[in-house]
Image (tube, grey):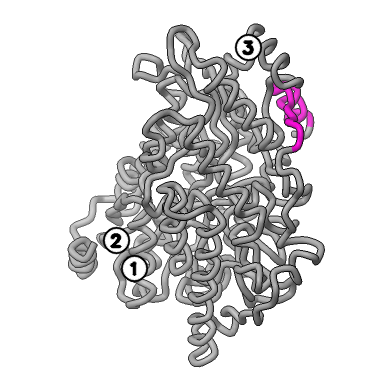
Amino acid sequence: MRTRIAVVLAASALCFSQGSLAGKAEAEKWINSEFQPSTLDKSKQMAEMEWFVKAAAPFKGMEINVLSETIPTHEYESKTLTKAFEEITGIKVNHQLLGEGEVVQAVQTQMQTKRNLYDAYINDSDLIGTHSRLQLAVNLTDWMAGEGKEVTNPMLDIDDFMGISFTTGPDGKIYQLPDQQFANLYWFRYDWFQREDLKKRFKKRYGYDLGVPVNWSAYEDIAEFFSVHVKELDGTKVYGHMDYGKRAPDLGWRMTDAWLSMAGAGSKGLPNGRPVDEWGIRMEKNSCNPVGASVTRGGATNAPAAVYAIRKWDEWLRKYAPPGAASYDFYQSLPALSQGNVAQQIFWYTAFTSSMVAPKSEGNNTVDDAGKPLWRMAPSPHGPYWEDGQKLGYQDAGSWTLFKSTPVDRRKAAWLYAQFVVSKTVSLKKTHVGLTPIRDSDIRHASFTERAPNLGGLVEFYRSPDRVRWTPTGVNVPDYPKLAQIWWQQIGDVNSGAFTPQQAMDRLAGEMDITMARMQTADEKANIYGGCGPRLNPEKEASFWLKKPGSPKAKLPNEKPKGETVDYDELLKRWKKAT
């Protein structure tokens, strides 16, 4: 990482390079050859691109560096949109792609050193609590109205971004601009669930219909059914569950990405539970100060619902997933579904839709000969502690983030590129490539109505009112990079058998409180977090908090109620009717 940063710093010193000619002719070429379809007609696309040509004129010949994680959407930006942007504006962009952990590390390094490593980042909105407190990221609301006004696209249309609430701080200011978003939903083999022989066998054994699981009890029954009782379909060994367990940073995100709240650990409230969020961190309503993660401080990271969630993750991985899944990481586990031997996945990211609709000739065994998906996506099932009004899952919102440590001229040039790749001229085509929609107008476009039957429910989900129940990490988390890195080691110790789920979560909650105590000291001494750093509650007996209504919640006498399912086609009709 040190070598990479040194190279970037050296490159950043070269502010200007020999730029290509740029202007209207280049814009027209790209509009005709690449930027179709669009929600704008070609005349409006040209008007938007002409604004970019004019706004970029002072920066023509500049070379800037931006960073994002590696997913298909960002690959398209890095390979295609940088070329278009340079030809149209004369600004050269080095759009680097790294793993999510390395992106977070680079962001943290730039925040800590205040040295300009990159001129902009596509940085998860999970850091909104960090950015709004530390005030090291540019407040985009004030930037767009002030210093960055002349480089802010008048056609940007902030209200059209579906995830703008995720990037808004508790002060009501926007700190990040969504570039792509994807949800973790339930994924299943629709073709298998439609087989009459399997439906009859399931109904006879479990007493209810095989369908989309509404609760974790049904998910567990379906996992057992395929792994233990069906075992083989059409000559292939099959499994009822897929997940991952490799000891790596993304194992921690596997849990902070709303796994505990899916079980029901947090409080009611959207986009995040208050006072207790999906991490189990308590922050009272009308306050900006987190008060603890441990149950003894009013948090829920080691409460019964969280322990239940970790236990089920570990049990299902051991009992029902294919051999080797425990050694997979995030990037390995999700594409593994294309082998065609898994019945369902409870925690599947829609960012992988593009790879799951690849043709059969490319080795994808989850589409038919005509390329139609044999699978579908549906709402996530919830655990027994979940209550209506809670979030139901995670939604990633990779969002453009500018830092005050970036020189203003480079920041303005990077802001132009950021707006270019999310502009209405470009965004619909980019959405068709990466299938990570950010604009409401894009997902409602006729081209997606036409494509919907080939995308397994993605379009219907994003058009439905249900989409608001999948949200990123929120403002309760005071410093995402510091706290996120604590998670994966503890969770890994469960999978390895070194600790029980209760022991691991007790240790995790304790370490989170220790880390937040250090933040509290720093904030009180030097106003590091703008007065919104942690202010830990004094410890009390766990029973004091567990007896109170809401989260943290006392252990249920029965953590496996009767399984409940819903027919997928009926669900789809409900979504379409609501739309």
Q: Nearer the viewer, residue 55 or 96?
A: 96
**The magenta segment:** 561-577
- Which residue corresponds to the image point at 32% horizontal and 47% vertical from the top-left? 82
Quadrant of the image occupied by residue 4: bottom left
Q: Evaluate if marks 1 and 2 touch, with contact meaning CB atoms under 8 Å apart.
A: yes
SS state under label 1: helix
Work out whether residue 65 can be spotted: yes
Q: Residue at x 74, y 58 (%)?
A: 554
Q: Position of residue 42 (x, y in %)?
A: 50, 37
> Which residue is rendered at x = 66% and y = 72% of the image?
296
What amino acid is at disc 2?
A: Ile
Question: Gap between marks 1 and 3, in whole Å?
Answer: 60 Å
Q: Is residue 416 above or below residue 231?
A: below
Please say if 114 is above or below 457. below
Mark 1 burial class by Cα count in 10 Å: few <14, some 14-19, many 20+: many
> Given the current orientation, which residue lies at the most extreme bottom position?
525
Question: Marks 3/2: CA distance?
Answer: 56 Å
Q: Which residue is mark 1?
A: 410
Q: Quadrant of residue 289?
A: bottom right
- Name the spot of residue 311 as percent of width and height, x first: 56, 46
Residue type beneath disc 1: Arg
The vertical placement of 378 against 528, above or below, is above
To which residue does mark 2 refer? 64
Left or right for 18, reference 440: left
Label 3: element kind: helix
Residue labelled with disc 3: 198
